Amino acid sequence: MSNKKKKKLTPIQQEYQDFAKAREPKRKVFRNCFRAFIVGGFICTIGQGLQWIFVNYFNFTEKTAGDPATAVLIIVSVLLTGFGVYDHIAQWAGGGTIIPITGFANTMASAAIEHRSEGYVLGVGGNMFKLSGSVIVYGVFSAFVVALIKITIKWLGGM
């Protein structure tokens, strides 16, 4: 692909490139950022509201209320994906729906739904992690790096 960019274009190819560029729709960056901000903020507000509910009505501490709130967000995200609602929200909001918990649940559920006709083991189990596998790998790797940094700082501080 990079070789094509370095290659000198013929006049006809250049004319086509100019033609295509003139007709390419302009991206509405400000509108897309605003929508992503609103929806992402709304999802985070719902999560904070759920945490508040678990603290005030179910006697969780602030530290322990995050786990059930996260579980509820995952369940709601999977249900909305299953009913086809999450995709419509994601089309409208763009990047605002990829809040780590709900976006991850959406990728897992959508891959499982897409491949369910191939069976539970080879279809759902085998293909569920194709989209979200990279998230798991980089999440585990970044946690490892952060742990190494923390251990090194503690070790250097104790010297």
Image (tube, rainbow, N blue to C red):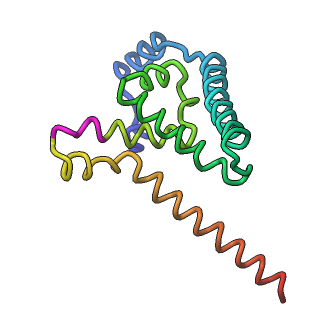
Q: Residue at x 61, y 24 (%)?
A: 39
Q: Mostly what secondary structure, the magenta segment?
A: helix
> Does 115 lie within the magenta span?
yes
* 116 sits left or right of 61 in the view: left
Find residue 11 and report its image quarter. Answer: top left
Q: Position of residue 119 (x, y in %)?
A: 16, 45
Does residue 132 sit above or below 85 in this rendering?
below
* 49 sits left or right of 76 in the view: right
Which residues lie in the magenta part?
112-117
Q: Nearer the viewer, residue 100 or 4?
A: 100
Q: Position of residue 87 (x, y in %)?
A: 42, 24
Does residue 16 sit above or below 6 in this rendering?
above
Q: Position of residue 155 (x, y in %)?
A: 76, 83
Does residue 91 sit above or below 73 in this rendering?
above
Q: Residue at x 65, y 74 (%)?
A: 148
Q: Quadrant of the N terminus?
A: top left
Q: Residue at x 46, y 56 (%)?
A: 136
Find residue 12 and report its image quarter. Answer: top left
Q: Nearer the viewer, residue 125 or 47?
A: 47
